[in-house]
Amino acid sequence: MTSDLEGIDGLGFVLYRSTARPGLDGSDMQDILRSARSRNQSLGLTGCLHHEEGLFFQWLEGPAEGLRQVMALLTSDARHSRIEVLDSGALNHRRFQDWRMRFSDRDRASLMDWFARSDTATVHRGDYAGGVVAFMLGLEI
Ligand SMILES: Cc1cc2nc3c(=O)[nH]c(=O)nc-3n(C[C@H](O)[C@H](O)[C@H](O)COP(=O)(O)O)c2cc1C
């Protein structure tokens, strides 16, 4: 897993997809969100985590140094594997400024259904990462 945060000293972002450990349950999710929200608050990170069909999608944004710290923790977390960075880089302004870690799952909204419904004007062909972010920004929670 590599994310392109080298050389960024201001705001950055990472969007990744990973495979959830089979059998992860609601109390595992609560644990993940508890540590995410508390550390993200202290590091000034915000973002969104979506869980569906055994996959995690997470957008994380904030000071690049904090992002690097959390990505290092995430990489060695056995609750998920096959972390694949979909996009990363510098950011002019936050997209999830009110959220220490917004969370949604299949019961609230389906990314897969959203992709199936989206027309090409919303999701440009091949812009998978852009589609995931648009879905996360449009969640009504
Ligand atoms: C899908 C997923 C998303 C996570 N997101 C975050 C996060 O945004 N911030 C964070 O600090 N930890 C996150 N974690 C947890 C870290 O991998 C790590 O377990 C945790 O930060 C350790 O914190 P603790 O000291 O509270 O135990 C996530 C874990 C998983 C499996």
Image (spheres, rainbow, N blue to C red):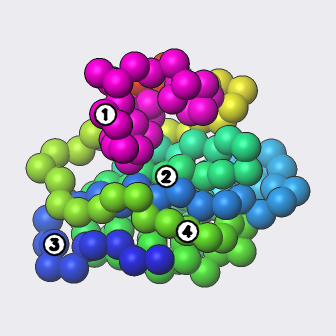
From the viewer's perspective, tell me whether residue 117 is left or right of residue 112. left
Residue under label 1, please give it. 124
Decide if ligand 1 comes within 8 Å of the CB at mark 3.
no
Residue under label 3, please give it. 8
Q: Nearer the viewer, mark 1 or mark 2?
A: 1
Residue 136 lies in the magenta-colored region: yes
Q: Residue furthest right?
A: 23
- Among the two numbered marks 3 and 1 on one chain, the one whose residue lies closer to the N terminus: 3
Can residue 28 be seen in this snapshot? yes
Residue ID at (66%, 35%)? 105
Q: Nearer the viewer, mark 2 or mark 4?
A: 4
Q: Nearer the viewer, mark 3 or mark 4?
A: 4
Disc 2 residue type (three-letter): Gln
What secondary structure is found at the residue carrying circle 1? loop
Disc 1 residue type (three-letter): His
Magenta segment, which residues? Answer: 110-137
Residue under label 2, please give it. 58
Question: Distance between the Cα atoms at labels 1 and 2?
Answer: 20 Å
Question: Distance between the Cα atoms at labels 3 and 1?
Answer: 27 Å
Disc 4 residue type (three-letter): Ile
- Among the two numbered marks 2 and 4 on one chain, the one whose residue lies closer to the N terminus: 2
Disc 3 residue type (three-letter): Ile
Residue ID at (14%, 65%)? 10
- Among the two numbered marks 2 and 3 on one chain, the one whose residue lies closer to the N terminus: 3
